[in-house]
Amino acid sequence: MIDTGKLLPADIEELARKVVDQNAAAGRKIVLAESCTGGLVAAALTEVPGSSAVLDRGFVTYSNEAKMESLGVPLDIIETFGAVSIACVWAMAKGALERSNADVAVAISGVAGPDGGTKLKPVGTVVFARATRNGDDKPEGELKLFNDLDRAGVRHQATLCALELLLP
């Protein structure tokens, strides 16, 4: 028997519903560029009936190659700052916006763990950026540390933060 319960935790589903409702009311379309969340933000939005009025598309660009090929992130940004950097997520957000019909883009990249962390970017480091069509070209990004959480916890918190950034 198939369990028809909730796919995602209640806090994510509730926030996703707010994002869909508020963006629909504002007439805004969304595009996502996800790395460490692996499509969880898009999955959360598509759990909400009526999300097709808001979600234009999502890019899951887990590898550096995918970030460069699908979103146009320059190699020099990845080589200089790394994939987990404000510079990279800003380029991801701008690239997603350019490759979509959306009004707002949010990009996420991070080190979910349990491996892959460094002294400068320990496990739990996640960076976010938001870009808007017709907005200024001033980078809008944020770095958060969820270093007391396991992989699922980091991805959960990153999904919530990305959804918050999508509120008008």
Image: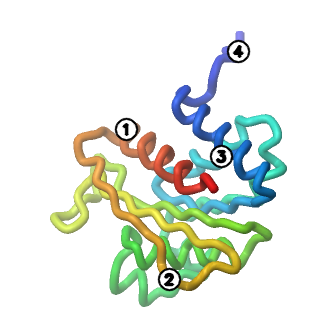
Q: Residue at x 82, y 48 (%)?
A: 52
Q: Secondary structure at mark 3?
A: helix
In the rendered structure, which amino acid carries the disc numbered 2?
A: Lys
Q: Is residue 101 left or right of residue 89?
A: right
- State if disc 3 and disc 4 touch (CB < 8 Å): no
User: Which residue does the numbered mark 2 point to in the structure image?
Assistant: 138
Give the x, y percent position of residue 35.
50, 59
User: Which residue does the numbered mark 3 point to in the structure image?
Assistant: 19
| Mark 1 crowd level (few <14, some 14–19, many ≥20, 10 Å Cα) | some
Q: How many marks?
A: 4
Q: Secondary structure at mark 1?
A: helix
Real-space CA distance between mark 1 and mark 3, rounded to the nearest whole angstrom: 21 Å
In the rendered structure, which amino acid carries the disc numbered 3?
A: Val
The part of the image, by quadrant, that contains residue 99 is: bottom right
User: Which residue does the numbered mark 4 point to in the structure image?
Assistant: 2
Real-space CA distance between mark 1 and mark 2, rounded to the nearest whole angstrom: 30 Å
Q: Nearer the viewer, residue 115 or 13?
A: 13
* Labels 3 and 2: the sequence-earlier one: 3
Residue placed furthest toward the bottom: 76
Rendered position, 161 above or below 66: above
User: Which residue does the numbered mark 1 point to in the structure image?
Assistant: 153
Give the x, y percent position of residue 18.
65, 40
In the rendered structure, which amino acid carries the disc numbered 4?
A: Ile
* Labels 4 and 3: the sequence-earlier one: 4
* Labels 1 and 2: the sequence-earlier one: 2
Q: Nearer the viewer, mark 1 or mark 3?
A: 3
